[in-house]
Image: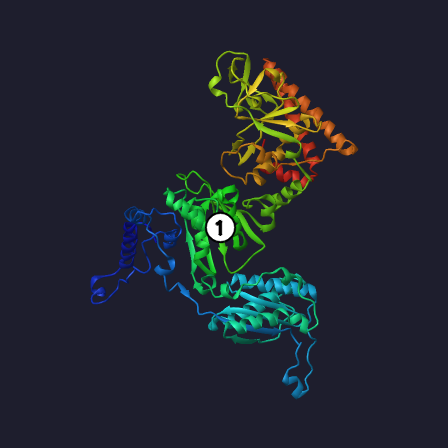
Amino acid sequence: MDIDQRAVDMAQFSLYVKMMEGEEFRSLFGEGVLPDLRDNIVCGNSLVGWDILDMGILPDDIDERNKILAKINPMNWEDAFPDVFRRKELKAYHVTWVTRNSRVSEEIVKFGKKGGVPVLMDEAAQEIVTEAILEKAKMMNIPVMALSVLSDHVHILIACEESELEKVVQEVKGYSSFVLGRRLKLSVAGLGRQRKHWAKGYSATYIRDDKHIRNVIEYIQNNHIKHHQKRNPLLQSWKPVPPDEAFSDKYAIAGGFDVVVGNPPYGADLTDYEKKYFRRKFGLGSVDTACLFAAKASELINNNGKSSFIIPKPFLYASNWRRLRKKLLPNIVSIMDCGKAWKEVRLEQIIYVLDKSIHTKKYISGKILPKGIIDKTEVSKDLCDEFDFLISGISESELEIGLKIKRIGSFLGEFISNNRGAGLQKHISGQGDYMVIGGKQVQRYYINGFKGFISKTVLIPENALIKSNSIIAQNIIAHILYPIDHIKINATIPQNYQNILILDTVNQLTVKNNIPAEFVLGVLNSRLISWYVYRFIFAKAVRTMHFDNPVTSKIPFPPISFVNKYHKNLRDRLISLVRDMLALHKKLAETKDERTRKVIQKQIEITDKKIDRIVYELYGLSEEEIRIVESREPR
């Protein structure tokens, strides 16, 4: 499908040429060898349907409206592919099945056979089964109008086609039995199911009209009273599908594609009318076309379908992609980090695979390199909520360390205020009363010269002034590709700060609660924090990375205790080493003798390693964990 008719014609022509390869004229004589592709390759807008007419966003003038529609070229997928998207003839069925051996069969009575031990579900098992039944029905897009799960049987009222009833019931029974077995450890992965929960077969009654549907709903809702059992707590908060909704297009439009794959356009130019349509239709908080195509693909596949797209890496972490992540994550089975797959494309890419037939609690992540896939890891989807991005390209051992650090208990944002300097660049000159520092001048533990000067006659905003007990840091974090991909946070404590102004390329971190700024600086400039920030805040993205409050508020911060002797000792040692480091860098800048400079530089390297060791200790890392961090985070 393409919005441009010329592209559609070229696609058809290319396929015809391909089909003709290797054929001879004589072998084709008298035969209709070229199929009609007009029903397979169509012209239209993949994202805009004819419901745009009902949204009140087009102009009232007919001629102007027609011009806009001709340019947008709306298309309904159901009309373009009627064999793929068909309307189901839904009927209501009251279905019942029982647990294994809970009913005595006629065969047992007639021939005197011994029956097995009845399977009875306690309240915990009933809740698990209820959750599994509703989950599977949602996966299959089957509306559930009523449900009762008791100790030895299940009642359910659903709407489906007669031809699919058998499959629906068997899949719901099978899935609920599987989930119950796993959750109660009655079956073990790899060894097969060790216990059957349901008896063979089921009963299903076709419910013909609205009156009988209402009666069945009431019967099922009160079934627990008849059997003198408690109502399932999960069903008390559950909202059943109303009968009128159960027969609506939401459930009646069946089918969809088996597979949708692609490399959608990124950031295509859109008209204002298209933007308004997409905001109302998709509600994703983004009108990036790659985001929209990914969402549309998940809607175009059938209940057992799969989709896989290569899209920009911001899908993993960007706030304007958050709604799409939430929409797709339940069905995502893998995410692979491709890095910069094409030289001419500025953004990094990822490939995701989505399977609509299953809701998984984990997905497979990894990084694709020319030599193959590395850092292949099984990631719990709960961690994506915890870190607020989709984890990919991080090894299992790194993930364990990241969790250990994150769960230290506090975050840096609780102990500092983080503000950028002022945009005073136009006032800078070769002389003046204040020395001016930009991001390039801020280095680890020292200031490398000045950007220029500003006169006192200029109105100086407060955020340009450096406060006491403050740290200054580069706003744009250095991203380094060699010898391996990593970042470096550059921060220092300025001396004689009363005569210094900072630009908006510098962040000022003012430390609160009487905590010495040297303690915070030692943690920030450590190898461990750069390692953590790159992986678990910036999602290992090659992009412009700003050291603003959204970042510092997510940096885990070690415990600060004035009572605990162990923590106090580590804190005092770190503060002392940071003061040594500041003094050494000051001495290095003042020293001209090359031999003396080498001696000082060696002391800086040794002190830096000592600071790293104390920070590792503050976060409780083992020697093996330290080895993993240092193998991936060069100095």
**Residue 5 in view, yes or no:** yes
Q: Nearer the viewer, residue 190 or 112?
A: 112
Q: Quadrant of the C terminus?
A: top right
Instruction: Report the residue that reaches farthest toward the front.
Output: 60
Judge left or right: residue 350 versus residue 492: left
The kind of residue on which mark 1 rests is: Tyr
Q: Nearer the viewer, residue 234 or 138?
A: 234
Q: Residues within 10 Å of mark 1 (few under 14, many from 20)?
A: many
Q: Quadrant of residue 124?
A: bottom right
Q: Is residue 63 above or below residue 150?
A: above
In percent of width and height, residue 109 lies at 67, 86
Q: How is the image coloured?
A: rainbow
In percent of width and height, residue 281 lies at 44, 51
Residue drawn at 62 percent across, 72 percent down: 198
Q: Quadrant of the N terminus?
A: bottom left
Residue drawn at 66 percent across, 72 percent down: 152
Q: Is residue 45 above or below residue 492?
A: below
Q: Which residue is mark 1?
A: 352
